Image: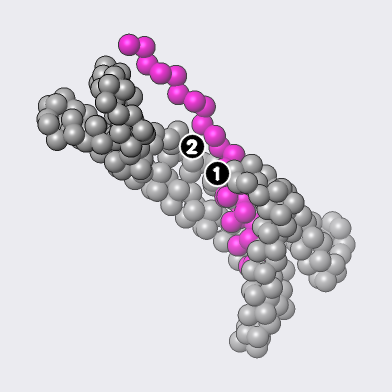
Amino acid sequence: MPEKKKNSYNWISDFVYGGIDGAVTTFAVVAGVEGAKLSISTILILGFANLFADGFSMATSKYLSDKTDQEQYDRIRKREKAHIGKNTSHKDQELNRIISSYGFKGKELIAAKKVFQSNPDALLDLIMRNEYNMTQENIHPEKGAFYTFISFLVIGIIPLLGYLLKPILNTDDSQTFFATSIATLGALFIVGAIKSRFTDRHWTISGGETALIGGVAATIAYIVGFLLKDIAS
């Protein structure tokens, strides 16, 4: 039997969630340092340290999570395949119960069971879905980690761009922070709008919610930095 062609990996969801986390956490670092009235060099040092360290941590978590899900699915599917091969009465009763839950009875149930028994892959998919609530997903741990890390860097660097370009743009501290806030919230809105592709929410609501979350996180960080600014002085 020819091997099924796998669907291409959908990297957009990884890029969206990595980008959101990158922008929010880096913006929070910037806001906290601004609240504490520390130097631009401090903003850049802490910002880039967070950008790469937190980005790597998130990519690693993504890799380990996907790898665990993949291994768990493969392990259970392999075990069920061995049980099907033994064709025990227990598995036969289990199959009757699953198929009957779809409304098949009598001769229809027997016919449906024969169809699945003649197609081991379909039978395994049926058992995995109904017994373990697991489906074969297009998971690729390495690609997931890669796209998560790249998006974290690409979107997460936006809150730092104003400070990197400050000498060229010749802006003061308040202007730089204002421009940074607008650019970051705008980026979060766009990424949040893209996120609506994976939900039933309208893109304006999804984008606004994402920008709001980033704004709240930055506000909290700014207040904490402001209250603790005497410690750094």
Q: Nearer the viewer, residue 154 or 118?
A: 118
Residue marked by disc 1: 14
Q: Look at the image and give the residue range highlighted in magenta.
A: 1-29
Give the crowd class for mark 1: few <14, some 14-19, many >=20 residues within 10 Å.
many
Amino acid bearing label 2 = Lys
**Residue mark closest to the camera, 1 vs 2:** 1
Image vertical order of residue 220 relative to residue 199, above or below: below
Rendered location of residue 223, percent (x, y): 67, 80
Q: Quadrant of residue 52?
A: bottom right
Comparing 98 with 50, the one in front is 98
Residue 124 drawn at (x, y percent): 29, 29
Left or right of residue 67, residue 45 in this image: right
Name the residue located 63 percent from the left edge and 61 percent from the top edge.
24
Q: Is residue 14 in view from this perspective?
A: yes
Determine the image quadrant of residue 107: top left
Does the segment drawn in magenta span residue 190? no
Mark 1 touches mark 2? (CB < 8 Å): yes
Secondary structure under tag 1 reads helix
23 falls in the magenta region: yes
**Considering only order in the chain, which callout, 2 or 1, is on the residue closer to the N terminus?**
1
- Front one among 164 and 181: 181
Q: Position of residue 213 (x, y in %)?
A: 65, 64
Residue 78 visible within the image: no
Residue drawn at point x = 33 percent, y = 29 percent: 104
Tag 2 residue: 143
Q: What is the three-letter code of the residue carrying label 1?
A: Asp
Residue 178 in the figure: left or right of residue 226? right
